[in-house]
Image (cartoon, rainbow, N blue to C red):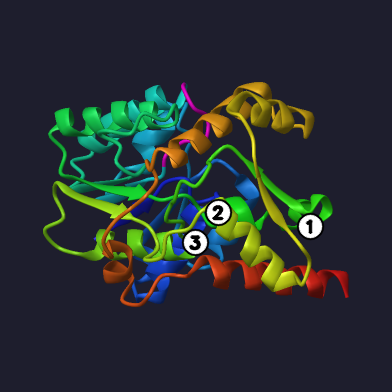
């Protein structure tokens, strides 16, 4: 059985490749597809089949799917244009006779009103209409979305946002990658839908407190109107269109649209998911080592 991981030169995709190898899948049965030649070369050193593919190049997609029985479609990174890219991937998978196409979506994609959810809704609809057996991984917010901003939080003494007291269930990329590997290797996954997040929900106020506890510095959460938060992000160098999306996403958190119930993630990976506190402490320890 050949398994294709698309976006394998990205952070989530590479972790999925590594998770499959950890589960003793022969490297020759894993196809790593991506567009970064250097990172593809690194993956090839692991023994997997590295195939150049670009979501915007239908020819490369068809070549990447040759001989593939199961595949993971890691959602594209550019909101808007990625829908057409996803459709091309689905077409290539269908032409190749793929037995299962697993897609990384967003929590509650069928009812989620966040701007980011639109692309996922269209992709899920296309999957349902494709006739391909598919499974949906509705991945919660990456904990790294927050832990990678640790230095900024400490510099300002604040976590900024527009989420109010809204709660969400974050998850580490590594945990979500392990879940993807588990679904790719499981039987009878057609039409499966997984809402994935950590067992413990948190607010951005909780995030600020965890940062303070891990670093010994006072950090508070400052809740801003959506427009003000967007302007703050633009001032920090975030492109205007993406700042708008991020601010809108925080309002989605305030509405509870990233709040995931149940323990589907823990069940898939066979252990408790990484908590916010664990992720923040690990990031703080790594930062301290870099500064030492």
Decide which of 254, 60 is in the foreground and name it.
254
Decide which of 124, 184 is in the foreground and name it.
124
Q: Residue at 72% across / 74% down in the picture? A: 285
> Magenta stretch: dominant SS?
loop
Please say if the residues under marks 3 and 1 sit with CB atoms less than 8 Å apart: no
Q: Can residue 69 be seen by looking at this rendering?
A: no
Q: Residues within 10 Å of mark 2 (few under 14, many from 20)?
A: few
Please give left or right for residue 50 compared with residue 213 in the image: left
Mark 3 or mark 2: which is in front?
3
Quarter of the C terminus within the rendering:
bottom right
Of mark 3 and mark 1, the one earlier in the sequence is 1
Residue 156 position in % (x across, y down): 81, 49
Q: CA distance from mark 2 to mark 1?
A: 25 Å
Which residue is label 1 attached to?
154
Give the extent of the magenta segment: 75-80
Residue 88 position in % (x across, y down): 34, 27
Decide which of 182, 227 is in the foreground and name it.
227
Q: CA distance from mark 3 to mark 2?
A: 11 Å
Q: Report which quarter residue 104 is drawn in.
A: top left
Which residue is label 3 attached to?
172
Disc marking residue 80: none
Residue 87 position in % (x across, y down): 32, 27
Which residue is label 2 attached to?
11
Query: Callout 3: helix, strand or loop?
Result: loop
Q: Residue at 73% across / 50% down in the picture? A: 158
Please give left or right for residue 132 compared with residue 204 in the image: left
């Amino acid at each position: 059985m050949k398994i294709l991981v698309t976006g394998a030169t990205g952070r989530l995709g590479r972790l999925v490749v590594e998770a499959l190898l950890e589960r003793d899948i022969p490297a020759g049965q894993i196809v790593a597809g991506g567009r970064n030649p250097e990172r593809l070369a690194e993956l090839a050193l692991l023994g997997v089949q590295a195939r150049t593919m670009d979501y915007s190049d239908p020819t490369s997609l068809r070549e990447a799917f040759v001989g593939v029985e199961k595949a993971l479609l890691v959602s594209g990174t550019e909101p808007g244009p990625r829908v057409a890219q996803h459709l091309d991937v689905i077409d290539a998978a269908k032409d190749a006779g793929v037995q299962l196409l697993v897609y990384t979506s967003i929590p509650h994609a069928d009812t989620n009103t966040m701007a980011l959810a639109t692309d996922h809704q269209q992709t899920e609809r296309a999957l349902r209409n494709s006739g391909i057996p598919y499974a949906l991984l509705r991945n919660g917010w990456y904990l790294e979305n927050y832990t990678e901003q640790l230095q900024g939080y400490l510099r300002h003494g604040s976590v900024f946002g527009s989420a109010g007291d809204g709660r969400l269930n974050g998850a580490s990329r590594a945990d979500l990658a392990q879940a993807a590997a588990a679904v790719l290797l499981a039987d009878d996954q057609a039409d499966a839908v997984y809402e994935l997040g950590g067992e413990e929900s948190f607010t951005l106020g909780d995030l600020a407190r965890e940062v303070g506890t891990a670093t010994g510095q006072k950090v508070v959460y400052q809740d801003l109107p959506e427009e003000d938060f967007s302007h703050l992000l633009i001032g920090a160098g975030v492109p205007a269109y993406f700042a708008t999306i991020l601010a809108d996403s925080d309002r989605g958190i305030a509405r509870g649209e990233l709040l995931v119930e149940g323990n589907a993630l823990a069940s898939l990976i066979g252990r408790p998911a990484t908590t916010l506190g664990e992720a923040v402490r690990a990031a703080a320890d790594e930062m301290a080592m870099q500064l030492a």
